Amino acid sequence: MSDPFAFNPLDEPTRRNPYPVYSSARKTHPVYIHPGLGAASVFRYADCESVLRDPSTWSNRFPQPEGMEASGPPGMIGTDPPEHTRLRGLVNVAFTPRIIRQREPRIRQIAAELVDQAIRQRSVDLVQALTYPLPTMVIAEIIGVPVEDREQFKRWSDEIVATLGGGLIGQQPSSEEIQASADRRAKMSAYFDRLAALRRSEPQEDLLSGLVHAEVEGERLSHDEMLSMLILLLVAGNETTTTLIGNCIVTLLEHPDQLERLRADPSLVPSAVEEVLRFTSPVQVDPRCATRDVELHGEKIRKDQILLCWLGSANRDEDVFEHPERFDIGRSNNRHLAFGFGTHFCIGSNVARLEAQIALRTLLDRTRDFRLATDSPLPLHPSFVFRSFTQIPLELTAR
């Protein structure tokens, strides 16, 4: 008798509502071997946490799709300790709580300008009006990208994430995609070469200046390490926070009682953001690669096999969260895994939280009402890694 359970992360109906599948998997298939894909998935909180805390068994180095090897080194996200520890130490200084607090007035200023402009228009795509420009401007200022170049960097970021994750489930890039990746990296490399040269002679108060001059135990970043680091920070700084802010608005609109509760008590904004992170995690999956043969729940994971840790499922695990399917903006003890866990815990989590809180509070403060301007399903992000929408048509009513 065939196994009735099936999980295809590329299936659009499943992507729109993966939670029934996640629930079934946690109960009956805590480890699922994807037929014909060479990958496996885990769904329970305890399993995801255990995998992510153990880089010696579960590596963040992945085999590259054929033809992609020349696109450059993996950078910080694709390394394990001790190499990862060295690279991360070079950028930690830009994301300390103190540095983030210093940026708070500027983030508030940007958010206020964007929301005020959106209110004047009344009908907007919230992605274009707020959720994309705010994180883009903030991460660009942190890195040191000039204002006139930010649109180009957003386009590069969008191109990079469009096919993110495909190689993990056996999708091979086309020759056109391979060439586009190589061309894009060459352009970004040339751009940062010029900018880094300027920062060597004229340092500024930005991350690029810090990376150009930084040393850890007498070693500096190589050119390729710095480029990979900047690409990672640019993409992660844009994509995750854009998704988080958009998910805050969409999820609150789907739960009008909680939106009304938040308007009545804005002090709940921080916990509301944490609940959105849990309830509709921006990054749904965090992959690892087995460094040796491992057995999990009776299933054998072979050396070099990909294991997909479904954070979106772990964050609704009934063994960890009370009433996990309930969206509760006042939830306490919210130990979600939305930013990952362990060695690769999201380095920009503090700034992502702050941007989302400021964006949400600004929107609430300056509007009497906002509502979706369409009954049609919102367009999904092209990559199954993210749970987000590329357009959010909104009608805004000023206070």
Image (cartoon, helix red, strand yellow):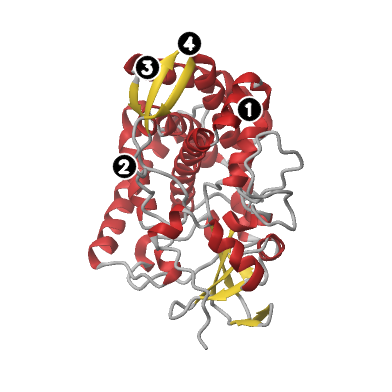
Is disc 3 placed on a helix, strand or loop?
Answer: helix
- Kind of residue sitting beneath label 2: Arg
Is disc 2 placed on a helix, strand or loop?
Answer: helix
The residue wearing badge 1 is 269
- Kind of residue sitting beneath label 3: Gln
The residue wearing badge 4 is 399
Between circles 3 and 1, the one closer to the viewer is: 1
The residue wearing badge 2 is 155
What is the C-alpha distance between the residues marked 2 and 4? 34 Å
Q: Earlier in the sequence, mark 2 or mark 1?
A: 2
Is residue 158 found left or right of 343 in the rendered image?
Answer: left
The residue wearing badge 3 is 117
Residue 226 is situated, as x and y percent measured from the top left of the image, at 48, 48
Which quadrant holds residue 352?
top right
| Mark carried by residue 168 | none
> Could you classify mark 2 by the number of other residues whose Cα lies within 10 Å: few (under 14), some (14-19), or many (20 or more)?
few
Q: Earlier in the sequence, mark 3 or mark 2?
A: 3
Identified at 45% across, 40% down, the residue is 238
